[in-house]
Image: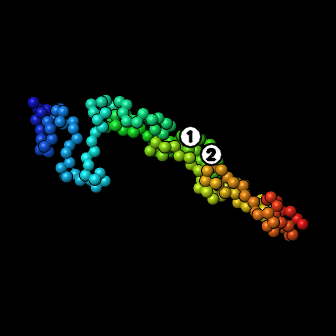
Amino acid sequence: MASLRACFVLFGALGLAACGSEAARKPPVDSGLFDDASTDGEVDAASPECLDKPLGTPCGSPDESECDAPDTCDGLGNCLPNFAPTNTPCGDPSESECDAPDTCDGQGACLANHAPPGTPCGPPIASACDVTDLCDGDGACVERFAEDGEPCGDDGSCASGICVER
């Protein structure tokens, strides 16, 4: 009887159903007391597939990848995604000036961490016909040279990245 009295003290004043009853497990009706603009007045309800299910019970999406384990019940009636934390290693572990190892984004996707297009890379400039190499945005360093015919040296011109004297 004491537990029923405690239940009434906790929930009776709010007009909720008695503890342990089927009605108590149903989502509450929105009374407008706890309006949340982000939910447009809707009350988030527990996942029906997780009601009365223990922690770890499979639910929701069964998809599995390096950054996303199958969804499971939390033991409180909610189905939760199991995303790997942000920056968890995944995918291609290789590393270069234009490509860092891939990492999870915390939302189930594996990100290719490429340097933005136009990021300088490669060896230092070696001659007047050699210009700064740049990352292409897809993880590669693109070798670049001055345009053929561009003047160089005392009386030369660039040809395929080499200064050719006339």
- Residue 84 seen in the current view: no
Picture coordinates of residue 25 (x, y %)?
A: 21, 36
Picture coordinates of residue 117 (x, y %)?
A: 61, 57
Judging by the rendered image, the residue that carries numbered circle 1 is 91
Q: Quadrant of the N terminus?
A: top left
Picture coordinates of residue 155 (x, y %)?
A: 87, 69
Could you tell me how far apart the alpha carbons at marks 2 and 1 are, in whole angstroms? Answer: 12 Å
Q: Is residue 103 above or below residue 116?
A: above
Q: Which mark is residue 121?
A: none
Q: Secondary structure at mark 1?
A: loop
Picture coordinates of residue 2 (x, y %)?
A: 11, 32
- Residue 35 seen in the current view: yes
Amino acid carrying mark 1 in the image = Gly
Amino acid carrying mark 2 in the image = Glu
Q: Quadrant of residue 129?
A: bottom right
| Front label number (2 vs 1) | 1
Q: CB of mark 2 within 8 Å of CB of mark 1?
A: no
Label 2: few (<14), some or many (≥20) within 10 Å? few
- The residue lying at 58 percent from left, 44 percent from top is 101
Label 1: few (<14), some or many (≥20) within 10 Å? some
- The residue lying at 19 percent from left, 52 percent from top is 33
Q: In the depicted view, which residue is nearer to us: 24 or 1?
A: 24
Q: Quadrant of residue 15?
A: top left
Judging by the rendered image, the residue that carries numbered circle 2 is 95
Q: In the rendered view, does 103 fall on the left or right side of 19? A: right
